[in-house]
Amino acid sequence: MLSGNLLDKMKAGTRLTVKEQFQLVFFLSIPAIMAQVTSVIMQYTDASMAGSLGADASASIGLVSSSTWLFGGVCGAVASGFSIQAAQSIGGGRTKEARSIMRQSVITAIIASLVLAAAGTAAGINLPAWLGGAVKIQSNARVYFIIYVLSLPAIQLNRLAGGLLQCSGNMKVPGILNILMCILDVFFNFLLIFKTRHIYFYGLKIIIPGAGLGVAGAALGTAFSQVLVAILMTGFLCFKSDVFKVRRGESWKPHRECILRAIKLALPIGWENLMMCGAMVVSTRIVAPLGSVAIAANSFAITAESLCYMPGYGIAEAAAALTGQCIGAGRKKLAARFAKLAVWFGIISMSLTGAAMFFAAPAMMALLTPDPAIQKLGVSVLHIEAFAEPMYGASIVAAGSFRGAGDTLIPSIMNFCSIWFVRITLAIILTGRFALKGAWIAMCIELCFRGIIFMARLYSGKWITKTGALS
């Protein structure tokens, strides 16, 4: 396999041409992008199927969506704390150490996710009311959120196993399993959301069974698909992976040093996710008084936009794996070159997807909801957001590169300052005058600002030179 051969050359200290560097970024990005796209398709599935039940059903999911991202972000931080260490160990040829990190990460992840699930369940009882949702949508929103947090152990294992496999250069298996999860989500949603109904096919009456659970069915469908894929992903990690396969006699006993390193790496990422998703929650609260149509349009537009920035996140995962392995191999100059190449690849990719979103916005919104008022408002804000995609891509991929190098604190502070001091401040000012469009104008300005400051840090070299001279 081309990417595997190039990774071996990189770890061996062999010089890589610019073409070979781009090939590594490209071939490692494609499966990661596909995995991200399937994740978004799951969101589309939930949103469109539940959206067919009406604006209130859509609004109930949209009301708590930012809160689900918050908990999902914490799971991602836990996974990153271990996958960064594993990538650097693999890059340095220390596979036994990488396996030890994997074993400790699985135990830690299970414990952390159970604590999160308990905390989320307790918080979910009053969350919809606190977010300012109308009384008529609070019950469905509460049920959706609680089902989501109860599935956090499966979500955590998926994030962890996928991250570890990707940092070892195996992008294919996580991509395939995420596609499977998308298919399962559609299947379970089809059975759980709608009531039993019948269709006629060439005069033949076909009965399609259904539980008729509505919004709760959408949450359960996603949860069931997460659980099944978590079993498969973790099983592959522990028993089939060339790097992480469990060997007989190797201890599962936690090592204090590894856990502390994971905490040191994960805390800034977790804090960043907490602050950013907290800002999303505040943004939801700003939008909530605008009514069910605005809440639903806001939620659907975010879902539609997410398909555009998935290439950025896929490239960021490849960049994190490559910079992490370069750092582990002691090749900091090559890590810096990979990071810059990946960032520009991200900018170009998201410029194209942003342009596509601008023109395809009406079709994208029509897929998500049959409500004309929601469609019209959603299209108008997507047209605004399209202009932010290039710089958003820069910030996403640069953050991934920094994360692979173990530079997590300063980027998290940058993200915090950008979203809280720029986006939230502008949203408060502009929403009062321009309603939902004002909130999205604020988002567009903030994402452009964030991309600029991340590019500045990338080219300053401080994210990599802080650990020593370039080699």
Image (tube, grey):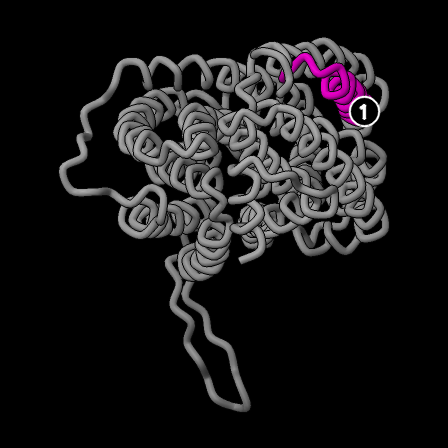
With respect to residue 348, does 446 lie above or below? above
Residue 54 visible, this angle: no
Type of secondary structure dominating the magenta stretch: helix
How far across and down, in percent of the image, does residue 163 sit? 45, 37
With respect to residue 127, does 223 lie above or below? below
Say if the magenta span includes residue 447: yes
How far across and down, in percent of the image, does residue 81 sit? 43, 23
Question: Which residue is found at the position 48% from the left and 60% from the top?
Answer: 183
Question: Which residue is found at the position 48% from the left and 52% from the top?
Answer: 178
With respect to residue 44, does 305 lie above or below? above
Packing grade of label 1 (10 A; few <14, some 14-19, many >=20) is many
Number of on-image labels: 1
| Quarter-of-image position of residue 363 | bottom right
Say if the magenta span includes residue 181: no
| Quarter-of-image position of residue 458 | top right
User: What is the quadrant of the C terminus in the image?
Assistant: top right
Q: Residue furthest left?
A: 249
Question: Which residue is found at the position 31% from the left and 14% from the top?
Answer: 257
Residue that mark 1 sits on? 448
In the picture provided, is 256 more to the left or to the right than 300? Answer: left
In the picture provided, is 17 more to the left or to the right than 318? Answer: right
The residue closer to the viewer here, 338 or 221, is: 338
Span shown in magenta: 442-464
In the picture provided, is 107 more to the left or to the right than 469? Answer: left
Secondary structure category for the residue under label 1: helix
How far across and down, in percent of the image, does residue 13 sit? 56, 35
How far across and down, in percent of the image, does residue 51 sit? 60, 49
Which residue type carries mark 1? Cys
Question: Which residue is found at the position 67% from the left and 51% from the top?
Answer: 369
Residue 111 visible, this angle: yes
